[in-house]
Image: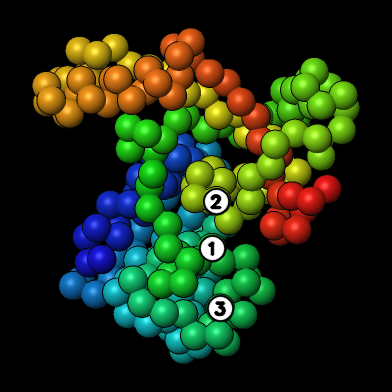
Amino acid sequence: MDLNTLWINVKKIWENGRGYKLREILEETDEVKIAIFTKGKTIAFVYVTIKQVSVQSIKKILKMAEENKSNEIMIATTGKVTPKALEIGRQNNVEFIHKRAPLLYIFDHWLVPEHRVLSKKEAKEVIEKFAGGNPELLPKILVSDPAVRILRAKPGDVIEIRRKIPPKEELVSKYGKKFGEYAYEVLKMLTPAGEEVTYRFVIETPEEYLY
């Protein structure tokens, strides 16, 4: 993946997935893109690069984020993050996208349904209605799932997954006649009722599926 492709996905994650706005691009070269995204009073410092992230580079990034009064930090690289740099980043609540933990903006794909993190009040109502008050009885989803990472849901959150079939004309307009009609037929098979809503309880480790 090149820098531009990585940047496009990161930008969609912040803007489309999390509701932030791009405020400023601080630096742009062939190897790095540094940007500020904001949402209300929250400032996110986003560092996108094709280079390996080392201890030296992460210290520099943390300093820049502090100078920009950032509340949140993301480092995205097409390369690796050294173990020590990863440790320093986690100690400073840095969010990473890297070679061993890649992340693309998946919600543009026609097969991926809408995901939404429920408010505490909504989650409580869902748990009462569908799980008798015990969230562990809901179907589960890992915190490492791409949709969960994009939405930044945490263990204990409840995610609503809503799949609905767009009009055939919309799919044809977007993908062309042949593939648009194919996509429509596939979605009809996946969702016979036209719309389907399910819920998932976010967990941290695969072992929690057993309980």
| Label located before the other in sequence (2 or 3) | 3
| Label located before the other in sequence (1 or 3) | 3
Q: Residue furthest left?
A: 177
36 or 165, nearer to the observer: 165
Q: Which residue is mark 1?
A: 95
87 or 198, nearer to the observer: 198
Residue 195 spot, x, y in % from top left: 48, 14
Q: Is residue 32 above or below residue 116?
A: below
Q: Which circle, 2 or 1, is nearer the viewer?
A: 2
Q: Residue at x 47, y 29 (%)?
A: 114
Residue 155 spot, x, y in % from top left: 72, 49
Decide: few, some or many residues near mark 2? Use Cα within 10 Å; few <14, some 14-19, many ≥20. few
176 or 155, nearer to the observer: 176
| Label located before the other in sequence (2 or 1) | 1
Q: Is residue 148 above or below residue 48?
A: above
Question: What's the residue type where badge 1 is placed?
Answer: Glu
Residue 122 spot, x, y in % from top left: 72, 23
Q: Which residue is mark 2?
A: 145
Mark sitting on residue 131: none
Decide: few, some or many residues near mark 1? Use Cα within 10 Å; few <14, some 14-19, many ≥20. some
